[in-house]
Amino acid sequence: MQKKILYWSLLSIPIILIIFLITLYFTNIWQPTLTSTIICLVLLCFVGIFVYYLITKSYRCYGQAEKNVGEFDNNIKQRIWKLGIIGFIADFFDTIGIGSFAISIVLLKLTKQIKNDKKILGTLNIGHAVPTCLEAIIFISLIKVEWLTLVFLIAAASIGSYLGAMFANKIKLGWAQIFISIVLIIISIIILLGQKQVGVMPSSGNADSLQIWWKYLVGAVVFFILGALMSLGVGIYAPAMAVTYLLGLSAICAFPIMMGSAAFLMPIGALRFIKDQNYEIKPSLAFTIGGSFGVICAYLIVFIGIQKGLGLNKDNFVNILTWLIIVVIWYTAGMMIYEYVKNKKQASKQEQT
């Protein structure tokens, strides 16, 4: 019975999203363009196919996974509930650009809700794939970005990720992390100095398109590199925020671009983990369900609730988002440096032994 409820909940996700978008349409919050509609329909197909594949592949293994839990978890309902909350929290913060993987790992470790550490990566990729697609659908639908800019940058990141996977083993992750973290810190200082509360440098633009040919070229090259680095496990959110700022786009335009880039990459990578059965079933399913609701709640609270509730105009809201971007960039740069130092210490200990 629990198993059927769980899988029916998965099937309800695309339906809930459609109802959500229809509600926004009739309240005039959503005014779709042809390009955004096409991209969102493609992503909805991604979600439908992915959910169906996840259900068919994991349904038959669910009973065996439940038997293998043993003393690790005697209360299945409570475990699903805990994992759902973890997914909700992780994807809530993912929606505002902080990322979901680091938060998920910390909460999984604290609550001891993951049995096999070797399957964490697969579990996270699968569990957060659908919520990431929902983020992209919502932001692409509701935030206006010129179609050529949106498609160009998303395509560049997707191609970069695909080709980058071929050379992933030849690139040293540590040096990439240090380089990116230093660049992010420098850019964050530039953004900070451009804030109207500081006023030392000119602020970013408020455009929704790149407009000039060389910006398209620079944007494509940088997003290609960011996509390639994603195959190494380097997140795209903070660098994408920084790049869109430097290219003169409005701060809010970073969200559909970076979410769209991730959405076209994660489900494809997650399918490989499902095929290889390199994931834990219950955490993946609970993350998918809880995370999807976390995405919707985050958008309603942060991007609609705060703006409407505080009566902010677009400029003031974008200013708040820019401060959020600065915090996210600092957090990401700090985490990269921390990971680099931690890995260095572990490597030196292994050499000594």
Image (cartoon, grey):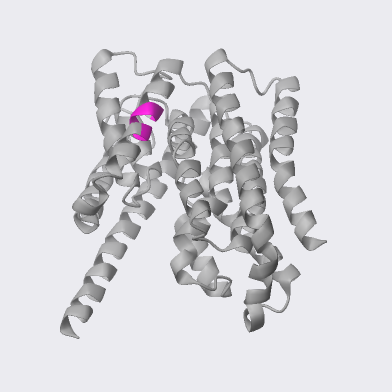
Occupied quadrant, residue 257: top left
Q: Is residue 31 above or below residue 237?
A: above
Span shown in magenta: 154-158
Residue 113, image quadrant: bottom right
The residue positioned farthest toward the right in the image shown: 1
Predominant SS of the magenta segment: helix
x 26%, y 68%: residue: 343
Quadrant assignment for the N terminus: bottom right
- Residue 304 vertical position relative to residue 342 in the rendered view, above or below: above
Is 157 covered by the magenta stretch? Answer: yes
Q: Position of residue 210 (x, y in %)?
A: 34, 18
Q: Is residue 270 left or right of residue 233?
A: right
Looking at the figure, which quarter contains the C terminus? Answer: bottom left
Q: Nearer the viewer, residue 45 or 129?
A: 45
> Whole-percent x and y of residue 11?
72, 43
Residue 73 is at least partly visible in this image: yes
